[in-house]
Amino acid sequence: MCLDFQTLPETVFSEDTTMKVREYFSRIAANVDIFVEQFRSISDDLLYDEEYMERFVIEKIGLNQEGLEEIAPELRPYCGRGLYIWQNPRQFSKYIIWMLQNAQKYSSYLEIGCRWGGTFIVVCEILRRVNPNLKWAIAADLIEKPPFIERYMELTKNSGFDILYFQGSSTSEEFIKLVNEKKPEISFIDGDHRIVGALKDHMLVREYSGIIIHHDISSDTVPETTLLWNSLKKLESGRQSVEFTDQYQSQKGKYFGIGALYNG
Ligand SMILES: C[S@@+](CC[C@H](N)C(=O)[O-])C[C@H]1O[C@@H](n2cnc3c(N)ncnc32)[C@H](O)[C@@H]1O
């Protein structure tokens, strides 16, 4: 298989609607196959190597091209490539290593706000690598099922690992019922970035999830999730916390940030 990512025209995000963008993504869905093949061939030694994994995130996973002002200038050539994850590679690489070391015992995963699906797919692969018995994962977003997730569902079909896509709001009755039935053991919250929305998501999963991850916890551009995280760290006194908030020196401000609250 050719291991070069297919890319979208640069104008896609500026000129087109979300529905139109979805059509473009279906043309590059084979990027999922390329990622999965490359990820599964990383040796165990390299998988836990922070520098290697940061380069892997940048060069072999690929970054989103929305919100470019939050991305370090030297990383911009890697935006609009691969799986279009909306992450800071320096933070995300350390976070995935932490997950490899701390999530082995959990068998289900929920991501609220999966966007194009790249982060969801990467985390599913991480969790499956450390726990071949990972049973299921749910991705949720307001938008129609992204083609990357459609492709990942095809790739994992009949493997004993089930993926469900929920289109709609995390505050809908249907979603609340689903979460209360399924009881996800790990939850990643990256949907509504208003403080009330992100807090509602937290309250929905806190009874079930041994690890709850929040995104944009140290961000000049998203102050409400930053405030929520600083509050939850104090309020959730029964849980331990870990943060991945490294920034690139070329940037003046603070962007993104990943925080996990977990049962020690
Ligand atoms: C920052 S993006 C997520 C990026 C993605 N997690 C990643 O790492 O690439 C936020 C997403 O949350 C979705 N969203 C916003 N409010 C939501 C809600 N109440 N329920 C579900 N999804 C929501 C938006 O449609 C958007 O796609």
Image (cartoon, grey):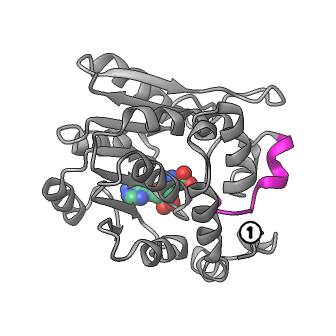
Q: Which residue is mark 1?
A: 3
Q: Would residue 101 be found to the left or right of residue 35 on screen?
A: left
119 versus 25 height, above or below? above
**Where is residue 154, by image quadrant?**
bottom left
Quadrant showing the N terminus: bottom right
Q: Label 1: state its secondary structure.
A: loop
Q: Would residue 201 be found to the left or right of residue 14 on screen?
A: left
- Does 82 lie within the magenta span? yes
Give the residue drawn at x 58%, y 32%: 94
Give the residue drawn at x 56%, y 59%: 118
- How many neighbours does mark 1 have within 10 angstroms: few (below 14), some (14-19), or many (20 or more)? few
Q: Would residue 159 be found to the left or right of residue 246 on screen?
A: left
- Does 159 lie within the magenta span? no
* Residue 226 place in picture, x, y as percent: 50, 29
Magenta-drawn segment: 73-84
Residue type highlighted by circle 1: Leu
Give the residue drawn at x 47%, y 56%: 120
Q: Nearer the viewer, residue 214 or 105?
A: 105
Q: Nearer the viewer, residue 171 or 122?
A: 122
* Residue 167 place in picture, x, y as percent: 37, 70
Q: Would residue 220 be found to the left or right of residue 131 on screen?
A: right
* Residue 86 place in picture, x, y as percent: 61, 51
> Does residue 62 show up?
no
Quadrant showing the C terminus: top left
Give the residue drawn at x 52%, y 39%: 96
* Residue 135 place in picture, x, y as percent: 27, 59
